[in-house]
Image (spheres, rainbow, N blue to C red):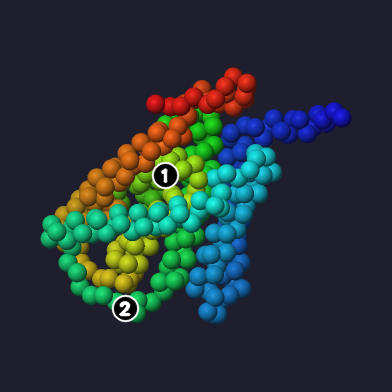
Amino acid sequence: MSIPASSSRLRRLLDFTIVRLFIALFATALAGGLTAQFVSDQTRGSSLHAGWPSLCGALAALAAYALYVRLVERRAVAELALRPAPAEAGVGLATGAALVALVVGGLAVLGNYRYEAFNAGAPGLVAAFAQMLFVGTFEELLMRAVLLRLLERSLGSWPALGLSSLLFGLAHLPGNGAGGLAMLIAVVAGAMLGAAYLATRRIWLCLALHVGWNFTLGSVFSIAVSGHERSVGLVTGQLEGPAWLTGGAYGLEASVLTLVLLLGCTAGLLALAISRGHLVAWAAREARRHPAAGALPVAR
């Protein structure tokens, strides 16, 4: 049976990276945002309002992305494989929390962080975690599963990682107290999260790293996240010293200690991705179009 010409033209159109980018970004963002808003409206005034909208929004974004992959790219959604999810998410959460603790501990040793109190009854921790889960899921789907992965399809791993990291940094620029160092660190953070995706070729490690960092920073140590207003978390303390070291109003994401730590973590994750053969060269797009030509070339 012959394939209708209109169907063939549609498939050729859907093969363009820019078309796939638009559809994937639009579908994922719309599903996540609208679902979170709808559930928020429906649960207003109830105990479910604290975290349920964020959780439902995250699940809707994941479902929309999976549906896009199946309908447009017509393949299994390997980047959302469930079997490795618990282990990779656990490692990501622990690593994100450990990175924050190392920066705070380093500042304490230098005399630039002073512990004040432990707040055993800190309010809103469940809601805060749910919100960070939504933010992490939303941003990692858009920046890594969509932007990095689809740019890599046309450009190869290194240019795609650079461009997606730059866009991630620009998206975090408007925070209070943002400056050149904060921008640089945001770009490096984007590279670290992108490297986490490339190392596993799944979303769970980079998503959990993102959530673990944000939650620990804001809801455990009560420090501003990307220049947003700080909240009361489990531990309160004071950062004292020059802005280049403490991050100033922007928070630890503008500290030179954070920059050094993230650069090291990024290098380690990239080394892991390279050792696993997960980075591909620009010429890989030709291999995808002509599978008979052989395996995808590895970018060294």
Residue at x-position 44% and y-position 71%: 126
- Expressed as whole percent of the image width and height from the top left, the position of residue 48 reads 54, 75
Q: Decide: is 227 above or below 156.
A: below
Residue 175 in view (yes/no)? no
Res 120 label: 2
Residue 46 in view (yes/no)? yes
- Outermost residue toward the right in this view: 1
Please give the count of numbered marks on the rendered protein.
2
Return the disc, 1 or 2, that comes first in the chain's sequence: 2
Q: CA distance from mark 1 to mark 2?
A: 33 Å
- Outermost residue toward the left in this view: 111
Quadrant for the C terminus, please.
Answer: top left
- Expressed as whole percent of the image width and height from the top left, the position of residue 243 reads 20, 54
Q: Decide: is 107 above or below 193.
A: below
Q: Is residue 292 left or right of residue 170?
A: right
- Label 1, secondary structure: give it: helix
* Label 1–label 2 contact, CB within 8 A: no
Label 2 amino acid? Answer: Ala
Label 1 amino acid? Answer: Ala
For label 1, the residue is 196
Of 151 and 284, nearer the camera is 284
